[in-house]
Amino acid sequence: MKTVRRAFAYALCALILLGACACGKRASAETEEPVYPKDFAFSFVWGVYGISSYDSRTGRLVKTKDTADIEKYTAAVTLSVADMNTVYRRLFSDIDLAAYPDTYDPFDGMGSKPNQTVIVSATAGGQTKTVTCKGIALGGPEYCYSEEAKAFWTSVTAIVELLTSLPEWEAFPPYEKLYQ
Protein backbone atom coordinates (compact mmCIF):
# COMPACT_ATOMS: atom_id res chain seq x y z
CA MET A 1 0.00 0.00 0.00
CA LYS A 2 2.86 2.39 0.84
CA THR A 3 4.42 1.66 -2.56
CA VAL A 4 1.19 2.62 -4.33
CA ARG A 5 0.90 5.85 -2.33
CA ARG A 6 4.53 6.71 -2.99
CA ALA A 7 4.12 6.04 -6.75
CA PHE A 8 0.95 8.16 -6.77
CA ALA A 9 2.75 11.00 -4.94
CA TYR A 10 5.66 10.88 -7.42
CA ALA A 11 3.27 10.89 -10.37
CA LEU A 12 1.34 13.82 -8.91
CA CYS A 13 4.56 15.80 -8.36
CA ALA A 14 5.67 15.08 -11.92
CA LEU A 15 2.34 16.30 -13.30
CA ILE A 16 2.52 19.48 -11.22
CA LEU A 17 6.07 20.15 -12.42
CA LEU A 18 5.12 19.53 -16.06
CA GLY A 19 2.15 21.84 -15.70
CA ALA A 20 4.29 24.57 -14.15
CA CYS A 21 6.86 24.27 -16.94
CA ALA A 22 4.18 24.40 -19.60
CA CYS A 23 2.57 27.43 -17.99
CA GLY A 24 5.90 29.19 -17.79
CA LYS A 25 6.60 28.59 -21.47
CA ARG A 26 3.12 29.72 -22.48
CA ALA A 27 3.41 32.91 -20.45
CA SER A 28 6.77 33.79 -21.97
CA ALA A 29 5.42 33.21 -25.49
CA GLU A 30 2.47 35.49 -24.76
CA THR A 31 4.68 38.25 -23.40
CA GLU A 32 7.35 38.01 -26.10
CA GLU A 33 8.02 41.36 -27.71
CA PRO A 34 7.46 41.79 -31.45
CA VAL A 35 10.60 42.00 -33.59
CA TYR A 36 8.52 43.19 -36.55
CA PRO A 37 7.27 46.70 -37.40
CA LYS A 38 3.72 47.65 -36.44
CA ASP A 39 2.51 47.44 -40.05
CA PHE A 40 3.85 43.90 -40.60
CA ALA A 41 1.32 41.62 -42.24
CA PHE A 42 1.61 38.73 -44.62
CA SER A 43 -0.46 36.49 -46.83
CA PHE A 44 0.56 33.08 -48.00
CA VAL A 45 -0.81 30.74 -50.65
CA TRP A 46 0.65 27.25 -50.99
CA GLY A 47 0.09 23.65 -51.95
CA VAL A 48 -0.92 21.69 -55.01
CA TYR A 49 -2.41 24.26 -57.39
CA GLY A 50 -2.31 26.80 -54.49
CA ILE A 51 -5.31 25.36 -52.64
CA SER A 52 -4.25 26.46 -49.13
CA SER A 53 -3.89 29.99 -47.79
CA TYR A 54 -3.50 32.25 -44.78
CA ASP A 55 -3.87 36.03 -44.44
CA SER A 56 -2.63 37.61 -41.20
CA ARG A 57 -4.73 40.75 -41.72
CA THR A 58 -8.03 38.86 -41.81
CA GLY A 59 -6.90 35.79 -39.86
CA ARG A 60 -8.45 33.57 -42.54
CA LEU A 61 -6.83 30.12 -42.74
CA VAL A 62 -8.00 27.85 -45.57
CA LYS A 63 -6.95 24.22 -45.83
CA THR A 64 -8.38 23.74 -49.31
CA LYS A 65 -10.39 25.76 -51.76
CA ASP A 66 -10.90 22.63 -53.86
CA THR A 67 -14.15 21.62 -52.15
CA ALA A 68 -17.88 22.03 -52.46
CA ASP A 69 -18.07 23.48 -48.92
CA ILE A 70 -15.09 25.76 -48.26
CA GLU A 71 -16.48 26.86 -44.88
CA LYS A 72 -15.67 23.48 -43.31
CA TYR A 73 -12.05 24.03 -44.39
CA THR A 74 -11.84 27.64 -43.18
CA ALA A 75 -10.98 28.96 -39.72
CA ALA A 76 -10.24 32.32 -38.11
CA VAL A 77 -6.72 32.32 -36.65
CA THR A 78 -4.77 35.12 -35.03
CA LEU A 79 -1.13 34.15 -34.83
CA SER A 80 0.73 34.72 -31.58
CA VAL A 81 3.49 37.31 -31.34
CA ALA A 82 6.00 34.43 -31.29
CA ASP A 83 4.57 32.99 -34.53
CA MET A 84 4.52 36.42 -36.20
CA ASN A 85 8.14 36.91 -35.09
CA THR A 86 9.01 33.57 -36.71
CA VAL A 87 7.38 34.52 -40.00
CA TYR A 88 8.99 37.95 -39.98
CA ARG A 89 12.43 36.44 -39.32
CA ARG A 90 11.91 33.88 -42.10
CA LEU A 91 11.00 36.58 -44.63
CA PHE A 92 13.33 39.43 -43.63
CA SER A 93 16.27 37.93 -41.69
CA ASP A 94 16.75 34.43 -43.06
CA ILE A 95 16.12 35.77 -46.56
CA ASP A 96 15.53 39.23 -47.99
CA LEU A 97 12.12 38.79 -49.58
CA ALA A 98 12.49 42.12 -51.41
CA ALA A 99 15.58 40.80 -53.25
CA TYR A 100 13.59 38.06 -55.02
CA PRO A 101 11.88 38.72 -58.35
CA ASP A 102 8.10 39.19 -58.47
CA THR A 103 7.76 35.96 -60.47
CA TYR A 104 10.09 33.22 -59.30
CA ASP A 105 10.79 29.53 -59.80
CA PRO A 106 13.22 28.16 -57.20
CA PHE A 107 13.36 24.91 -59.19
CA ASP A 108 14.40 26.69 -62.42
CA GLY A 109 11.82 25.21 -64.77
CA MET A 110 11.67 21.65 -63.44
CA GLY A 111 8.17 20.28 -63.80
CA SER A 112 5.81 17.95 -62.03
CA LYS A 113 2.22 16.89 -62.38
CA PRO A 114 0.46 17.99 -60.33
CA ASN A 115 2.35 21.19 -59.71
CA GLN A 116 2.16 23.71 -56.91
CA THR A 117 1.69 27.43 -56.49
CA VAL A 118 3.23 29.52 -53.73
CA ILE A 119 2.50 33.22 -53.35
CA VAL A 120 4.22 35.09 -50.53
CA SER A 121 3.18 38.68 -49.88
CA ALA A 122 4.45 40.74 -46.97
CA THR A 123 4.14 44.33 -45.82
CA ALA A 124 6.70 45.82 -43.46
CA GLY A 125 7.95 49.36 -42.96
CA GLY A 126 5.48 50.75 -45.48
CA GLN A 127 6.68 48.48 -48.29
CA THR A 128 4.84 45.50 -49.77
CA LYS A 129 6.57 42.73 -51.67
CA THR A 130 4.91 39.80 -53.40
CA VAL A 131 6.75 36.80 -54.85
CA THR A 132 4.65 34.51 -57.04
CA CYS A 133 5.78 30.97 -57.79
CA LYS A 134 3.00 29.72 -60.05
CA GLY A 135 2.82 26.18 -61.41
CA ILE A 136 6.23 25.16 -60.09
CA ALA A 137 7.44 21.61 -59.48
CA LEU A 138 6.70 19.79 -56.26
CA GLY A 139 9.98 19.32 -54.45
CA GLY A 140 12.19 20.09 -51.53
CA PRO A 141 15.15 22.42 -51.07
CA GLU A 142 17.53 19.79 -52.41
CA TYR A 143 16.06 20.40 -55.89
CA CYS A 144 16.60 24.17 -55.83
CA TYR A 145 19.00 25.53 -58.42
CA SER A 146 21.02 27.89 -56.19
CA GLU A 147 21.75 28.73 -52.56
CA GLU A 148 19.38 31.73 -52.78
CA ALA A 149 16.62 29.48 -54.13
CA LYS A 150 17.31 26.95 -51.39
CA ALA A 151 17.14 29.66 -48.70
CA PHE A 152 13.84 30.93 -50.14
CA TRP A 153 12.35 27.43 -50.26
CA THR A 154 13.57 26.62 -46.74
CA SER A 155 11.76 29.74 -45.45
CA VAL A 156 8.61 28.84 -47.39
CA THR A 157 8.69 25.30 -45.99
CA ALA A 158 9.13 26.57 -42.43
CA ILE A 159 6.14 28.90 -42.74
CA VAL A 160 3.99 26.10 -44.19
CA GLU A 161 5.04 23.86 -41.29
CA LEU A 162 4.11 26.59 -38.80
CA LEU A 163 0.67 27.11 -40.37
CA THR A 164 -0.10 23.41 -40.75
CA SER A 165 0.86 22.70 -37.13
CA LEU A 166 -1.78 25.08 -35.77
CA PRO A 167 -4.57 23.40 -33.76
CA GLU A 168 -7.15 24.91 -36.13
CA TRP A 169 -5.44 23.23 -39.10
CA GLU A 170 -5.30 19.90 -37.31
CA ALA A 171 -9.05 20.19 -36.55
CA PHE A 172 -9.98 20.44 -40.25
CA PRO A 173 -11.50 17.35 -41.85
CA PRO A 174 -9.40 15.30 -44.29
CA TYR A 175 -9.06 16.58 -47.86
CA GLU A 176 -11.99 15.68 -50.10
CA LYS A 177 -9.75 15.48 -53.15
CA LEU A 178 -6.28 13.98 -53.21
CA TYR A 179 -3.83 14.64 -56.02
CA GLN A 180 -1.45 12.11 -57.52
Image (spheres, rainbow, N blue to C red):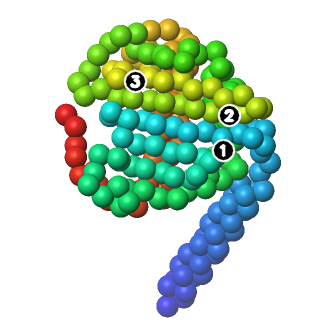
Which secondary structure lies at badge 3?
A: strand
* Residue 30 image point, x, y percent: 72, 58
Nearer mark to the viewer, of 1 and 3: 3
Whether residue 165 sits left or right of residue 9 in the image: it is left
Mark pair 1, 3: CA separation: 25 Å
Mark 2 or mark 3: name the one nearer the start of the chain: 2
Disc 2: CA contacts within 10 A as few (<14), some (14-19) or many (>=20): some
Q: Residue 134, labelled with which disc?
A: 3
Whether residue 70 sits left or right of residue 180 in the image: it is right
| Residue at the spot 54% in from the left edge and 31% down from the top edge | 120
Question: Mark 2 near mark 1, Cβ–Cβ under 8 Å?
Answer: no
Question: Mark 2 near mark 3, Cβ–Cβ under 8 Å?
Answer: no
* Residue 90 image point, x, y percent: 62, 31
Q: Residue 123, labelled with which disc?
A: 2
Question: Mark 1 near mark 3, Cβ–Cβ under 8 Å?
Answer: no
Does residue 68 lie above or below 85 as drawn? below
Q: Residue 84, labelled with which disc?
A: 1
The quarter of the picture where the C terminus appears is top left
Report the amino acid beneath label 3.
Lys
Does residue 86 lie above or below 173 as drawn? above
| Residue at the spot 59% in from the left edge and 72% down from the top edge | 15
On the question of residue 165 being in view, the answer is no
